[in-house]
Image (spheres, coloured by chain):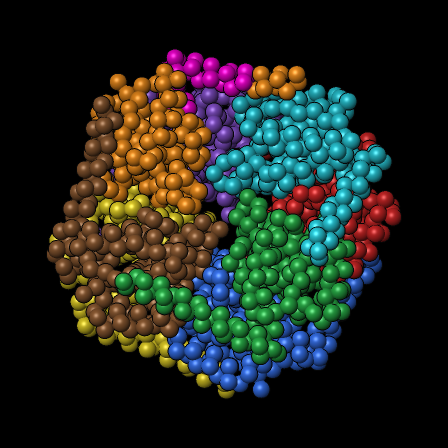
Chain colours: A green, B red, C cyan, D blue, E purple, F orange, G yellow, H brown
């Protein structure tokens, strides 16, 4: 049973969506990936949101480039938390997608993370943090991830000293 | 019978929407004004678009600030031309709204005009130009408007010479 | 008989202009392509606009990079709708061209679409939407295009489930 | 028992922090407000995070302007979700704070919302959405808030028709 | 006989145009001021350029806000040097006007100066420097202006020491 | 005898400086090229300016990237017109160099042109236009250049029709 | 005997320069304030730098708006550390001054701090930190300043609890 | 005994950190390089700062990309001068890192230098300038570096004349 739905605004965003999936797997969080465009297939977006609500999804992660409306459109249909990952697929380096995601009007929030690959990873970790509030296994995995990050840096320093 | 629907993303955008209405009146184009938020009232947006399609509206003008999804959301539901007017209501001077409007992904276009008051006027004139393709009265009004603009500048120069 | 004139600001913009032509062909809209610079050949621009007006063109699409004056200069000579496509040919990613197109002063509008290739496609579709108001064949083609877009996404999801 | 800690980066951000508190109150979520600077009082930040972890806080909301490190610094100390609200207190309109919040490196996420007042409201609602996953009362309040938003727009339209 | 034509893109730019005139007067350079819009009155622009060419004008100064096409449109009609002064009259602080002026395509240059009041002064001084190449009186006035600037700063320092 | 001094802020800017030289050659304008950094070799800048003043140079063209102070520093030492060409050699696409050139304080102007290669060409043409005020040969060359530009576009259109 | 020279690029920057002086006084650092423009009075800049070098100044703080060349020009004349404070006096919010200060080419550094008032304070504290390396009294004052900052925040929290 | 600590925010920033080391070597300044992330390993940052304070380090240089909090976090723990080098490792060209470094709130300064490689060199030279205040050998090396820079440009000019 998927706890996170990862929705990509276009097929070209799939590589970033899969980055989310990899991180969610690492955190032991079941997830499912979709492609759905807020503009080209709004009905599919509606169907995915409804399906997610029925199945008890805890977080929606939506990735999109250009005028990235997808996260906001999902947020307008549900009160389940929505995380938006801006993708730098347009010539404007992703600043267009970032502003389209975070600058939501008061009343309907989106949780914006960074642009591109590291944003996709962070979107997945943020979803994990939200789910970890009621799932001690995910909490433990998150703590392990933090420790691994510290270890990586420790090793890098040891190599530098040599 | 309204030929143009002017839809404001929030009540605070109404002053700009009325700027559109004033210009459409001047061009002899019947119009109707609405408030509807892509995020806070997506069903109202759907209803307005459906109503517009039934009544044979020729152009939708949508005005919005912040992450201005309204024009794009309308465009995703209809093949009637949609004009988006970015409003500078957020701290970012309207650049957020501008990018959210013009940077639509390939397949579902929005016609973006300038930010704020002059954008609202131009949105209305652009709507007039589209309708004028099949309405000689609007065409004539547009030509008169152009002549008035030339006259205003002519007079300004005459005053400068004095 | 061409219903849309596609005008490229320089030879290097031709690849984007041809993107417009391809989409207009798909929509069953006759079009003609030109090269004309607002700055280097203003007389050619004038001639093309006059020719277009005589031949009953319904929309001008103008593509340009850098300080993209071409759409605005065309708009200053006609009340036929003008669509401007900003091209990212300068070092500034197309933000210079975008602002030069949309930020027209009140009174003479340009319809701005996105930067680069997807903007070129959307410029053509927007032209199609304008012409479809009086042409049921184009209207049908636009609806087919929308359906194809939905199908593409449906198939992408089916592949993801496998 | 507070479920959300609202931490302001400086005394001048308090008005925005209180905007969060008002919204959390409306959602029936207990919260507590603090002032703590990532740079001027890092120890206070540490103490608040530790206290929050002990007391079982579900979400940290951190508001800051300029180079808004506060949300990221909190996120580096806990795996409880952290929401960052960029404040436009520097001359750069809040774009500095926004980038300092969302552009976190891969591994340690912050949930960014919009700049200023509407961002503060949305930060609180997002916190509510996260808590609502395990609290049906908050879920109900969120749904009521959505309905009120729809009502406000409905009324605005009725007034426009008159 | 005017040696510099100062052309304002709209009546609201006149205050900046008069800043140019004041500085040109101080340099002993005869000038004449006009209002002419590249978009609303392109014929007036043509007439002014032709008149200027006939009367032996040495420099055109064009001031405009928004998508400031005026300087570029003048430059496309003459090989007399054109100075463009971007005015911050749109919500975008004048960055739109600046890019519309300097980012001219290769072949037809505009000389861009700073945004707003100090840009207007500098546009006039630059015109003076160009004319001074063949006019020793203007050269002398420019040198006096430089000396005055030095004196002003000298006095400011003397006051600070007191 | 050189009439234009082309000064590059660093060796890496030489390719753009040579673009200037090629265009000046084409206009029949004698020129000389230098490397001098406003920061690393301010004395060399002083020497070049003094030499230029003695030899009766008509225009200085200064090309620089990053915080491009070179044109402004030259302008502070002479009343001969200075043209600044911003080079996109830093990660910021040349916007840093552009603002460092045009945003001069009131009293000491620089003539800014576009970023990079087309800016280098336009800097040279602008220098030609300034010198042409007193040199009919350059004036003729400039008119020929304009005609060639028109011819190039004419031919491009003829090829498109085929 | 002044250990820090505070140099303002124009009289309008004096209020920010005095902010530096106030902070330096608080740190027990003797300082002297000047007005000198890199462009309008380069000789005065040279004199101040020479005087500072003779008198054994430890840090130059230079404040400037627009294309803020002053810090870089000072840095080109000395190897004494130069701190640049960008002032938001132009329409571009100080981003022009910031880039003109930090984006120095490799070889001649400037130490950039924040834009405007808080930048002016931080410039002074940074100067204090540099001098504190060899002056234990300043070191102590800096530590007291840090403690005061912590106290201010502690008190703010105590008030919030009441 | 290291006088400068060079701290890289991630392993991918090491190439820039080594650029600092090379320049510090050239200036005869002993230094040590570390990897430590403000977010992923805040304890390592604390340890490095404490170690540096004990060993009498004179300057911390911190290099980081994205939301570059590292320099600010170090500055919050010490009154030893901290130089921040923004790295362009995110899609936003380093403007995110630059603003995260320089826009520190009043009270805790960071010395920002340019983005990327030349910034890394300048960070090292600035550190050298600070240490040179009490170390005549470093002072001499800095003066030699300046002379070499002048020589390089002199030679480049001699080659151009040939």
Q: In this view, does E70 lie to the left or right of F35?
A: right
Does G21 appear above or below B83?
Answer: below
Residue at 54%, 32% (x, y): give it.
E70
Q: Does the magenta stretch include residue F127?
A: yes
Does E98 appear above or below D56?
Answer: above
Q: How many labels does the image show?
A: 0
Q: Is residue B144 left or right of residue B136?
A: left
| Image quadrant where residue F54 sits | top left
List x then y, in percent, for residue D9.
46, 71
List x then y, in percent, for residue H149.
21, 41
List x then y, in percent, for residue A113.
55, 61
- The segment highlighted magenta reads F125-152
User: Which is the main secondary structure of the residues drawn in magenta?
Assistant: helix
Q: Which of D6 and H18 is in front in this view?
A: H18
- For the question of whether residue H58 can be seen, the reply is yes
Residue at 42%, 34% (x, y): give it.
F116
Residue at 66%, 59% (x, y): give it.
A33
| Quadrant, the C terminus of chain B | top right
Residue furthest front in the image: C162
Does D137 appear above or below E159?
Answer: below
Residue at 39%, 53% (x, y): give it.
H87
Q: Is residue D127 magenta?
A: no
Q: Which of G27 and D27 is in front in this view?
A: D27
């Amino acid at each position: 049973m998927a706890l996170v739905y990862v929705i990509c605004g276009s097929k070209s965003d799939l590589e970033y969506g899969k980055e989310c999936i990899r991180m969610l797997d690492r955190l032991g969080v079941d997830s499912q990936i979709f492609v759905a465009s807020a503009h080209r297939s709004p009905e599919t977006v509606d169907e995915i949101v409804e399906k997610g609500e029925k199945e008890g999804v805890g977080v929606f992660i939506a990735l999109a480039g250009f005028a990235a409306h997808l996260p906001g459109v999902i947020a307008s249909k549900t009160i389940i938390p929505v995380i938006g990952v801006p993708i730098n697929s347009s010539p404007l380096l992703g600043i267009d997608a970032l502003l389209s995601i975070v600058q939501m009007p008061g009343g309907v929030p989106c949780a914006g993370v960074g642009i591109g690959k590291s944003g996709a990873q962070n979107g997945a970790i943020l979803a994990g943090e939200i789910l970890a509030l009621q799932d001690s296994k995910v909490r433990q995995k998150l703590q392990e991830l933090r420790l691994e990050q510290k270890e990586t840096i420790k090793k890098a320093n040891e190599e530098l000293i040599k």
